[in-house]
Image (cartoon, coloured by chain):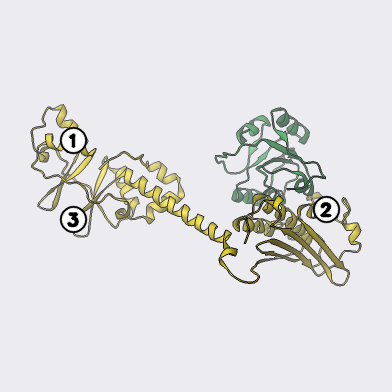
Chain colours: A yellow, B green
């Protein structure tokens, strides 16, 4: 047994939530050291010291007739060295008041035992009370790190799968459609749909630049639906391997003069909306600058349809959603 | 510049949960019109604003803004702070006015992260 790994202090285990969760999820047998080198009680301390030095052990269980009878640690050997007493049997200096843990206990049980007692290692027993391994704080920190790394890989895998969605599916035309209903006057949630769209695009492998440009365009469109419509409207985003089509549509009241609405600074917003930082007459102008193609169709009877298209095979965009 | 340095310089107060923000802030922009922000702010900027509603945080999220500084002693409501905590966008409030806060931070080395209006928004 070695203690060469950095130790998880009890404070640390408590301050990191995921680590704490893992301490409850992981079982002792998953992190303990198996196939432990055991010593018989009747060898001399001199011999034990040689083994410890050669194998870089800091402690070992003592077994007699297949049963755990004690634990001898480097501290015990130091005690014997101080007393110049290396010519006695291991059984003379070993610890016999043993605190043990069970192999199917959660790791947190071992952590609690470590903080309650002064022991640096605990023998792990199976249901029959037979020794199956040893656990140290180093084993726990190692086990937790491995588990955290597993979590991280799982997350990476999800991200990878999302970004390779279009490679894995064979069809004449593959696309993913995201749809959001936007309510009139819902300022509290204003921008929520756009944040989700931006996040989804990043997850699908869009570059931060593309996600940001699409985000700004749909955000302005979302705020327009909240501010200017009769009953709100719909945001629809279609992601294809080579382009992202964003659409905002509503059922009225429609824009009277589309040409004028496209002019920077032109606005029909009320003072109340201006006080919220919107309605400066820059929304449509911003959208036009962010996307590759924009179309605005509006009539008094049928409401407004705004199409915004971003092409992903444009070299300038430097994208990686590619089929 | 570290977030804590900014807080010290403008004698401000951090309103969101204290975390270790490893990313440095190198530039800023001051504006009250969210469309201006969306149109002109470079990514990774600090935003100084007198506007104080959840949309500011949403705007920050969309425009990749690193921190929001509310000037003239404005305090956002709990909902705004909640969203900011959730999205990990630190909020700072200062009693200083917009002009003074911008001046101090610019003098201390933060660059202008405001693009000319006719530039591309990417």
Q: Earlier in the sequence, mark 2 or mark 1?
A: 1
Q: Would residue A45 appear left or right of B66 to someone viewing this image? A: left
Disc 1 crowd, CA 10 A, few/some/many (<14, 14-19, 20+): some
Q: Earlier in the sequence, mark 2 or mark 3?
A: 3
Mark 1 to mark 3: distance in Å? 23 Å
| Label 2 and label 1 in one chain | yes
The residue where tag 1 is placed is A76
The residue where tag 2 is placed is A285
| Chain of the residue under the numbered disc 1 shown in the image | A
Q: Which mark, residue A130?
A: 3
Q: Quadrant of residue B68?
A: top right
Mark 2 to mark 1: distance in Å? 79 Å
| Chain of the residue under the numbered disc 2 shown in the image | A
Helix, strand, or loop for circle 2?
helix
- Name the residue at 87% across, 64% down: A255
Res A212 visible = no
The reply to whether discs 1 and 3 touch (Cβ–Cβ < 8 Å) is no
Residue mark closest to the camera, 2 vs 3 = 2
Position of residue A54 measured from the top left corner of the image (x, y, whole percent): 20, 37
Helix, strand, or loop for circle 3?
loop
Position of residue A127 measured from the top left corner of the image (x, y, whole percent): 22, 60
- Name the residue at 64% across, 31% down: B8
- Name the residue at 59% across, 70% down: A170
């Amino acid at each position: 047994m070695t203690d060469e790994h950095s130790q998880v202090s009890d404070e640390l285990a408590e301050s990191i939530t995921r680590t704490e969760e893992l301490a409850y999820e992981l079982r002792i047998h998953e992190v303990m050291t198996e196939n432990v080198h055991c010593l018989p009680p009747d060898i001399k301390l001199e011999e034990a010291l040689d083994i410890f030095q050669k194998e870089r052990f800091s402690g070992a269980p003592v077994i007699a007739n297949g049963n755990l009878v004690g634990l001898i640690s480097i501290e015990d050997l130091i005690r014997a060295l101080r007393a110049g007493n290396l010519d006695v049997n291991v059984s003379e200096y070993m610890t016999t008041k043993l605190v043990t843990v069970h192999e199917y206990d959660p790791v947190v049980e071992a952590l609690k035992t470590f903080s309650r007692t002064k022991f640096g290692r605990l023998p792990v027993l199976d249901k029959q009370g037979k020794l199956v391994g040893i656990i140290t704080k180093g084993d726990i920190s190692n086990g937790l790190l491995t588990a955290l790394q597993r979590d991280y890989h799982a997350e990476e895998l999800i991200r990878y799968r999302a970004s390779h969605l279009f490679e894995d599916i064979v069809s004449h035309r593959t696309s993913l459609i995201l749809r959001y209903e936007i309510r009139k006057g819902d300022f509290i949630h204003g921008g929520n749909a756009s944040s989700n769209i931006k996040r989804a695009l990043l997850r699908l492998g869009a570059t931060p630049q593309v996600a940001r440009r699409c985000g700004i365009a749909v955000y302005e469109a979302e705020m327009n639906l909240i501010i200017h419509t009769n009953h709100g409207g719909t945001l629809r985003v279609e992601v294809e391997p080579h382009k992202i089509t964003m659409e905002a549509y509503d059922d009225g009241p429609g824009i009277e003069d589309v040409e004028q609405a496209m002019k920077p600074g032109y606005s029909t917003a009320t003072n109340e909306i201006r006080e919220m930082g919107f309605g400066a007459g820059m929304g449509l102008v911003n959208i036009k600058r962010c996307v590759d193609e924009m179309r605005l169709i509006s009539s008094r009877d049928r409401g407004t349809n705004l199409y915004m298209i971003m092409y992903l095979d444009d070299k300038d965009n430097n994208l990686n959603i590619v089929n | 510049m570290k977030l804590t340095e900014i807080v010290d310089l403008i004698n401000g107060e951090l309103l969101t949960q204290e975390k270790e923000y490893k990313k440095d802030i190198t530039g800023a922009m001051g504006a009250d019109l969210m469309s201006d922000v969306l149109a002109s702010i470079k990514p990774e900027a600090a935003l100084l604003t007198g506007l104080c509603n959840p949309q500011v945080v949403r705007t920050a999220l969309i425009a990749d803004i690193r921190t929001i500084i509310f000037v003239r002693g404005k305090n956002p409501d709990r909902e705004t702070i909640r969203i900011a905590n959730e999205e990990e966008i630190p909020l700072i409030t200062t009693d200083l006015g917009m002009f003074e806060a911008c001046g101090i931070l610019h003098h201390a080395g933060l660059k202008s992260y405001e693009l000319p209006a006719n530039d591309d928004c990417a």
